[in-house]
């Protein structure tokens, strides 16, 4: 629902978000009140000690104060439980109750101070049990006050107090155009500055230069544009993701049409080609994983990695000419040796240098496949995250390539950096001087996979036989023309419901619209959605059949936004009201659609149990196309399916299965 408006400003919390925290505090207050009541009753006639009079008044006042707070909390929880996410009408009295509850913090603060003073008075000589009870009360009061302050800071919306106005329907937007245009500019600038401050705060630990400042502004504008046309609070988004996941699982459980099953039955020629590529991908995924260095090695070998690295790393230390950037204690290089199984002499160049748009990579000789491998590291630092989030589109213009088109800006700049190092510094010339008959293979995972793909496009004319294996690359990478062009030399490998492979601005816009639609039209209160959703995610079972206003509507009607959706997408709070033409649910896309590179191998996990699968997991792989990844799928594995160890495990499983079949 729209953010709660109290004290004349919008907050990042809804009027239906007080059920669970309010119920928890209500339980604590009830136990607290009963404990104080028992303490007061047992020691009622024993307040004749020094300081006992103040103690008697303190406990009596505390009982009255706790009773008042319990009443206010009960009313707050009850009212917050009413209505639905898109129907806040039954909760219209909640701000008044909230004001009452907040007012009770003043006497509670005073009572906490009085209790602290009484406890610290050395002249008090009352019974030890009573003193301990008061100490516990004082500590509990201060803990609740501190957590309340933290909660207020968390739900504070910096844009909640911005004053704009609504233009009624039918009124020409050209009226007072200079005033409205200036107002719109001020609102947008304020929103961009807020997002930029948040990003700077998150990246406060890295050295910031001009590139960082440009990236901060670009990313801030991206976030501002994405969140400016909705009025949802974080719990609404969580509820929407839960509903989408259950709706998605219900659709997956439906039996498929025979035509759908037949379309996934490839010919023997295609199957043979797939087997070859899977074997190559399993081999080269080791190089892509090794590019992460010691963090990946320690993550996959938590008990023995440090001992092995301490014992072996110092034996083969590369010279300064081979290595760029810092590798303290030689852990990165030692991990690469362990993972790939190569020798030191097989490495041509290793770069651990890491800045925004400049990511680590290494060049090595792979004698098993007779290849010169360029392995690019994926996201592992704040600088890499900024490169990922620099998601604006830019033109990629290459000589002798007719399929020019749009590409991801940040990843393209990272590819340009590696291209300059490989060509201008003569790294590839050095490699081909050592092994002139070897072929060039470029690999990478995640950000490294996207960078490797664009780097392969740049090097394609100079090395016509090159191959690229992109593992879990970002979805919003190449325009359609470039994606088709890369099918001849790039293979992308995607596991399961990997989120990153489906990440693009059009897909994020689609996810936002799906969340708004399903949240706005669900007829259940939010607390029920969250509780049942958490149970479903943890313990499984059948997805809940939440009734919605979408039930029983024909397909044509579903293409039109409903009233509740319009209230969340258009009728925003003043701080989020744009004076420009509103972006409706069925408006044309604001961002060009970008796709995954090359031919796509989609690996899917097969398991009889939907939740807790056995350790012997089976995978199936098939050729897929980019349209399969045009929508973000909600799943507990949407993050884990992206991890490099999971990708390597799936590829090794398929490769071993293929080998056992051949031996049979």
Image (cartoon, rainbow, N blue to C red):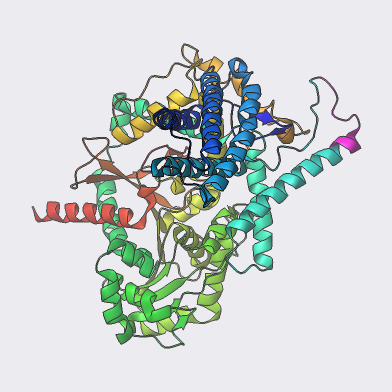
With 381 as the anchor, is 391 left or right in this view? Answer: right
Query: Residue 273: image x %, image y %?
Result: 28, 52
Question: Can residue 367 be seen?
Answer: no
- x 42%, y 88%: residue: 319
Query: Residue 190: image x %, image y %?
Result: 75, 46
Q: Is residue 245 magenta?
A: no
Q: Is residue 175 magenta?
A: yes
- The one nearer the camera, 106 or 55, is 55
With 213 as the anchor, is 49 left or right in this view? Answer: left
Query: Is the magenta region chiefly helix, strand or loop?
Result: loop
The N terminus: image quadrant: top right
- x 86%, y 35%: residue: 180
- The one nearer the camera, 3 or 652, is 3
Residue range of the region highlighted in magenta in the rendering: 170-180
- x 43%, y 34%: residue: 46
Give the quadrant of residue 473.
Answer: bottom left
């Amino acid at each position: 629902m729209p953010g709660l408006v109290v004290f004349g400003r919008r907050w990042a919390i809804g009027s239906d978000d007080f059920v669970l925290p309010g119920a928890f505090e209500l339980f604590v207050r009830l136990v607290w009140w009963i404990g104080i009541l028992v303490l007061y009753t047992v020691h009622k006639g024993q307040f004749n000690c020094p300081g006992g009079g103040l103690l008697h008044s303190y406990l009596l006042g505390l009982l009255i104060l706790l009773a008042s707070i319990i009443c206010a909390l009960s009313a707050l929880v009850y009212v917050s439980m009413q209505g639905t996410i898109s129907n806040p009408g039954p909760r219209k009295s909640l701000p008044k109750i909230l004001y009452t509850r907040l007012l009770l913090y003043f006497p509670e603060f005073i009572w906490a101070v009085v209790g602290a003073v009484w406890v610290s008075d050395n002249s008090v000589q009352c019974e030890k049990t009573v003193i301990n009870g008061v100490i516990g009360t004082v500590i509990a009061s201060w803990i609740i006050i501190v957590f309340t302050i933290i909660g207020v800071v968390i739900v504070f919306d910096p844009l909640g107090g911005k004053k704009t106005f609504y233009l009624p329907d039918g009124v020409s937007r050209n009226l007072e155009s200079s005033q409205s245009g200036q107002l719109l500019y001020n609102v947008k600038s304020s929103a961009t500055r807020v997002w930029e401050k948040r990003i700077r705060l998150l990246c406060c630990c890295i050295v910031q230069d001009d590139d960082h400042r440009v990236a901060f502004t670009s990313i801030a504008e991206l976030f501002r544009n994405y969140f400016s046309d909705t009025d949802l609070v974080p719990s609404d988004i969580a509820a929407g993701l839960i509903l989408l996941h259950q709706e998605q699982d219900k659709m997956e459980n439906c039996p498929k049409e025979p035509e759908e099953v037949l379309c996934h039955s490839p010919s023997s020629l295609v199957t043979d080609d797939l087997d070859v590529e899977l074997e190559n991908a399993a081999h080269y995924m080791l190089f892509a994983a090794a590019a992460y260095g010691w963090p990946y090695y320690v993550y996959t070998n938590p008990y023995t990695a440090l001992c092995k690295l301490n014992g072996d790393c110092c034996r083969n230390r590369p010279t300064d000419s081979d290595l760029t950037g810092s590798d303290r204690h030689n852990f990165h290089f030692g991990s690469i040796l362990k993972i790939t199984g190569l020798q030191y002499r097989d490495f041509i160049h290793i770069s651990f240098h890491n800045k925004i748009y400049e990511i680590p990579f290494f060049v090595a000789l792979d004698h098993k496949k007779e290849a010169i491998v360029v392995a690019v590291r994926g996201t592992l630092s704040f600088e890499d995250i900024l490169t990922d989030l620099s998601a604006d589109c830019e033109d990629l213009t290459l000589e002798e390539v007719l399929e020019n088109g749009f590409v991801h800006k940040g990843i393209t700049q990272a590819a340009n950096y590696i291209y300059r190092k490989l060509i201008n510094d003569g790294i590839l010339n050095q490699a081909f001087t050592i092994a002139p008959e070897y072929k060039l293979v470029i690999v990478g995972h995640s950000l490294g996979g996207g960078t490797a793909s664009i780097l392969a496009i740049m090097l394609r004319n100079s090395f016509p036989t090159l191959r690229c294996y992109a593992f879990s690359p970002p979805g919003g990478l190449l325009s359609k023309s470039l994606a088709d062009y890369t099918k001849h030399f790039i293979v992308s490998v995607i596991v399961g419901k990997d989120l990153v492979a489906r990440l693009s601005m059009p897909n994020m816009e689609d996810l936002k619209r799906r969340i708004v639609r399903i949240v706005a039209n669900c007829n259940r209160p939010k607390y029920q959605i969250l509780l049942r959703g958490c149970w479903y995610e943890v313990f499984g079972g059948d997805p809940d059949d939440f009734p919605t206003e979408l039930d029983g509507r024909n397909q044509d009607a579903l293409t039109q936004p409903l009233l509740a959706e319009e209230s969340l997408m258009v009728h925003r709070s003043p701080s989020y009201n744009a004076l420009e033409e509103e972006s409706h649910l069925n408006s044309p896309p604001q961002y060009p659609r970008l796709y995954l590179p090359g031919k796509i191998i989609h690996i899917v996990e097969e398991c009889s149990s939907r939740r807790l699968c056995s350790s012997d997991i089976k995978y199936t792989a098939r050729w897929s196309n980019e349209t399969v990844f045009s929508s973000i799928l909600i799943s507990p594995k949407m993050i884990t399916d992206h991890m490099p160890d999971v990708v390597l495990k799936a590829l090794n499983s398929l490769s071993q299965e293929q080998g056992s079949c051949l031996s049979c």
